[in-house]
């Protein structure tokens, strides 16, 4: 190891918390670019998403994890397992909680017990402080701190961009000496094919309602690129013919709107003209297909 490498630091920080706590919004703020999809609906994030931040000689890899909740289905169990594994493997755990939720403490009791049993400390981020009366925050912070599993407590609003630098300042000193693991200009480790599928899935969340987005999978099947244009073929998998009809919409209007919104964002991201061809297929048991889990980095056998 050279003297230059010894001077550098690099480590991993897991953003963990209940569904809809604002973890993905926080990750995007930390990185300064959109690297994780965001929705008002819960359980949007299915896989671990890494966003990379550089502060002087330190490279910080923030890991956005699926939300913590009580899983019932195979996919849900795999998602929660990914969050737990991330917390076990990183240098710093950041628990992000939504202070506007009246049951925010109860939401995280099992995870805090898991930290305590493992002898691991975490940083507590009280998020969405812009949405509540500030007078409730000191008592809430103290309630969490009394559990004995938090080394620091920060108050922030990821949506408003307040308190973000404070989190980066805090974790940078906890990164171990190490060569950087990613190129200096890299902000996300997600393969572009998966990122494109995630963008389309986000537009589905934006457009469709109730439970339908949760029983849908998007796969990028083909990718052809030249200097001026990218041609992408994607398949949206649903479980029933009725769901396919909803995704298509009357006269194909819904799928057209989803495709237009996804294409616009992809063109901004890729800085090229994008031809996006989306197909909708019925695959009743896609949630039992290991290949979908592998593409998201999830353990099918949990």
Image (spheres, rainbow, N blue to C red):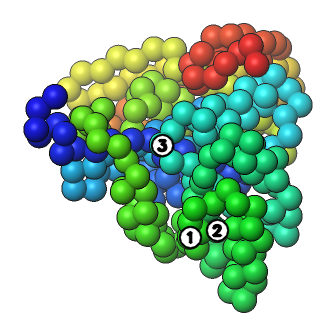
Camera-nearest label, 1 or 3: 3
Element on which disc 2 rests: strand
> How far is disc 3 from disc 2 in space, using C-alphas?
20 Å
CB atoms of marks 2 and 1 within 8 Å: yes
Q: Which mark is residue 91?
A: 3
Camera-nearest label, 3 or 2: 3
User: Is 284 placed left or right of 197 in the picture?
Assistant: right
User: Is 135 placed left or right of 183 in the picture?
Assistant: right
The residue at 44%/31% (across/down) is 190
* Residue 270 x/y as whole percent: 32, 37
- Using the rendered image of the protein, determine whether residue 262 is visible from the camera's viewpoint: no
Element on which disc 3 rests: loop
Residue marked by disc 1: 154
Q: Name the residue at the left extreme.
A: 3
Q: Camera-side residue: 121 or 33?
A: 121
CB atoms of marks 1 and 3 within 8 Å: no
Q: Camera-side residue: 135 or 90?
A: 90
- The quarter of the image holding the N terminus is top left
Choose top left, top right, bottom left or bottom right for residue 187.
top left
The residue at 22%/56% (across/down) is 56
Q: Earlier in the sequence, mark 3 or mark 2?
A: 3
* Residue 259 x/y as whole percent: 55, 36
CB atoms of marks 3 and 2 within 8 Å: no
- Using the rendered image of the protein, determine whether residue 65 is visible from the camera's viewpoint: yes
Q: Earlier in the sequence, mark 2 or mark 1?
A: 2
User: Is 73 placed left or right of 267 in the picture?
Assistant: right
Residue marked by disc 2: 126
> How far is disc 2 from disc 1 in space, using C-alphas?
6 Å
- The quarter of the image holding the C terminus is top right
């Amino acid at each position: 190891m050279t003297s230059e490498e010894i001077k550098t630091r690099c480590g991993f920080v897991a953003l963990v918390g209940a569904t809809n706590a604002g973890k993905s919004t926080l990750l995007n703020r930390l990185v300064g670019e959109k690297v994780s999809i965001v929705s008002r609906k819960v359980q949007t994030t299915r896989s671990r998403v890494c966003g990379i931040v550089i502060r002087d000689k330190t490279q910080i890899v923030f890991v956005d994890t699926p939300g913590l909740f009580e899983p019932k289905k195979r996919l849900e169990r795999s998602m929660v397992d990914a969050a737990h594994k991330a917390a076990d493997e990183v240098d710093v755990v950041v628990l992000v909680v939504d202070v506007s939720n009246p049951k925010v403490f109860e939401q995280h009791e099992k995870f805090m017990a898991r930290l305590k049993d493992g002898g691991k400390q975490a940083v507590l981020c009280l998020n969405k402080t812009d949405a509540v009366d500030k007078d409730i925050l000191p008592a809430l912070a103290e309630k969490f701190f009394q559990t004995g599993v938090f080394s620091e407590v920060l108050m922030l609003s990821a949506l408003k961009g307040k308190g973000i630098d404070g989190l980066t300042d805090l974790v940078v000193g906890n990164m171990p000496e190490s060569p950087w693991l990613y190129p200096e200009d890299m902000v996300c480790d997600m393969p572009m094919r998966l990122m494109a599928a995630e963008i389309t899935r986000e537009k589905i969340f934006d457009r469709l309602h109730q439970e339908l987005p949760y029983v849908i999978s998007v796969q990028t099947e083909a990718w052809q690129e030249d200097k001026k244009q990218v041609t992408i073929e994607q398949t949206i998998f649903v479980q029933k013919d009725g769901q396919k009809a909803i995704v298509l919409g009357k006269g194909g209007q819904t799928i057209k709107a989803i495709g237009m919104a996804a294409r616009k964002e992809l063109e901004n991201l890729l800085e090229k003209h994008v031809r996006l061809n989306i197909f909708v297929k019925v695959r009743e048991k896609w949630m039992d297909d290991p290949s979908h889990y592998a593409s998201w980095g999830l353990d099918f056998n949990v």
